[in-house]
Image (tube, helix red, strand yellow):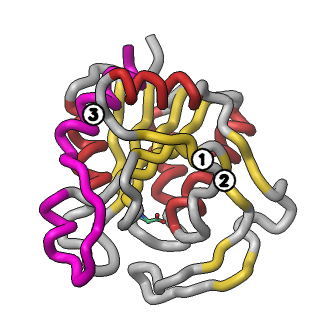
C-alpha cells in the first residue's frame, strides 16, 4: 500500500484561507495511508517539508497551491531552479533571479502520469490542464525541493495548482475565476488515489 505525503500552504497575500490547504485537508481526511503537512509560505519551507518527509517516509509527495486567476486545475509538469518573487514571502523576503539549489539541474520533471490525471479530472467534470510553468514563487520552490527529494530517494512527486475558491474570489478587488474546493477535492481524491 503506497504511503503519500500531501502538503499545502498557509494563507498569503490577501487570502484569508488558502483554498489549496482546504483541498489538501479534505483529500488527506479521506485516506488511510496519507499524511498532511501545511507549510509556511516562505523561501525556507523545505525545512518543514524535509521534517515531514523524514517523519512519514512516504513513497509519494503531492503538493497543492493556489494560483489566483487560473480558471482550471493545473497539473504541473516541471519545477524550475529559479526564484523571482512577485511579492514578499510571509517573512518579508523577496529574492529575485536566484537559483534554488546552486549545483542543481535547471529543472526537474515529475515522473507521474500527468496526462491521465488531467483526463480523469475531465471525466469527473473538473476543468483541468497540463501546466509547464509552476511560477517562480514559493510553490515552484517547494516543488523543486520535492522533486529533488524524489530524485534522491527514488520516489514519486507532483504539484497541483488550484483556482481561488468562490469565497476568496469574492473578496478580491478585481474579478477572478474560481471553483468550489469540495468538488476539486472529491475529484482529486479519485484521480490520485484510485
Ligand atoms: N500559492 C503560492 C505559494 C503558496 C500558494 O498556495 C504559489 O503559487 O507560489
- Answer with the quarter of the image where residue 110 lies: top right
Residue 44 is covered by the magenta coloring: no
Q: Are marks 2 and 1 in contact (CB under 8 Å)?
A: yes
Observer-nearest residue: 173 or 91?
A: 173
Crowd rating for badge 3 (residues with CA inside 10 Å; few <14, some 14–19, many 20+): many
Say which of 122 and 194 sits in front: 122
Horizontal side of 168 relative to 91 (left or right) equals left
| Magenta stretch: includes residue 186 | yes
Residue 166: x, y in percent? 16, 59
Q: Earlier in the sequence, mark 3 or mark 1?
A: 3
Q: Residue at x 36, y 40 (%)?
A: 127
Q: Residue 50, percent across and down?
A: 54, 50
Kindly state the secondary structure of the residue where label 2 is placed. Answer: strand
For the residues bearing labels 3 and 1, Cβ distance under 8 angstroms:
no
Q: Secondary structure at mark 3?
A: helix
The structure residue drawn at horizontal position 36% and vertical position 66%, both measured from the top left corner, is 68
Instruction: Find disc 2 in the rendering and name its residue.
Output: 79
Mark 3 and mark 2 residues within 8 Å of each other at the beta carbon: no
Could you give the CA–CA distance between mark 2 and mark 1, rounded to whole angstroms?
9 Å
Quadrant of the snapshot with the C terminus:
top left
Which of the two marks, 3 or 1, is nearer to us in this view? 3
Rate crowding at label 2 as few (under 14), some (14 to 19) or many (20 or more) other CA atoms within 10 Å: many
> Of the numbered discs in the image, which one, if any, rests on residue 27?
3
Vertical position of residue 20 compared to residue 75: above or below:
below
The residue range painted magenta reads 166-194
The residue singled out by tag 1 in the image is: 146
Amino acid at each position: 500500500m503506497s504511503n503519500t505525503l500531501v502538503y499545502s500552504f498557509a494563507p498569503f497575500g490577501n487570502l484569508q484561507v488558502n483554498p489549496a490547504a482546504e483541498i489538501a485537508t479534505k483529500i488527506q481526511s479521506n485516506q488511510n495511508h496519507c499524511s498532511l503537512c501545511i507549510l509556511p509560505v516562505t523561501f525556507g519551507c523545505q525545512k518543514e517539508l524535509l521534517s515531514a518527509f523524514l517523519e512519514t517516509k512516504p513513497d509519494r509527495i503531492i503538493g497543492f497551491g493556489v494560483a489566483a486567476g487560473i480558471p482550471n486545475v493545473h497539473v504541473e509538469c516541471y519545477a524550475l531552479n529559479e526564484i523571482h518573487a512577485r511579492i514578499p514571502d510571509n517573512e518579508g523576503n523577496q529574492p529575485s533571479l536566484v537559483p534554488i539549489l546552486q549545483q542543481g539541474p535547471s529543472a526537474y520533471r515529475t515522473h507521474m502520469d500527468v496526462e491521465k490525471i488531467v483526463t480523469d479530472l475531465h471525466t469527473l467534470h473538473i476543468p483541468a490542464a497540463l501546466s509547464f510553468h509552476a511560477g517562480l514563487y514559493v510553490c515552484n520552490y517547494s516543488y523543486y525541493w520535492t522533486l529533488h527529494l524524489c530524485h534522491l530517494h527514488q520516489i514519486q512527486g507532483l504539484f497541483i495548482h488550484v483556482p481561488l475558491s468562490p469565497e476568496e474570489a469574492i473578496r478580491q478587488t478585481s474579478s477572478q475565476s474560481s471553483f468550489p474546493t469540495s468538488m476539486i477535492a472529491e475529484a482529486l481524491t479519485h484521480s490520485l488515489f484510485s
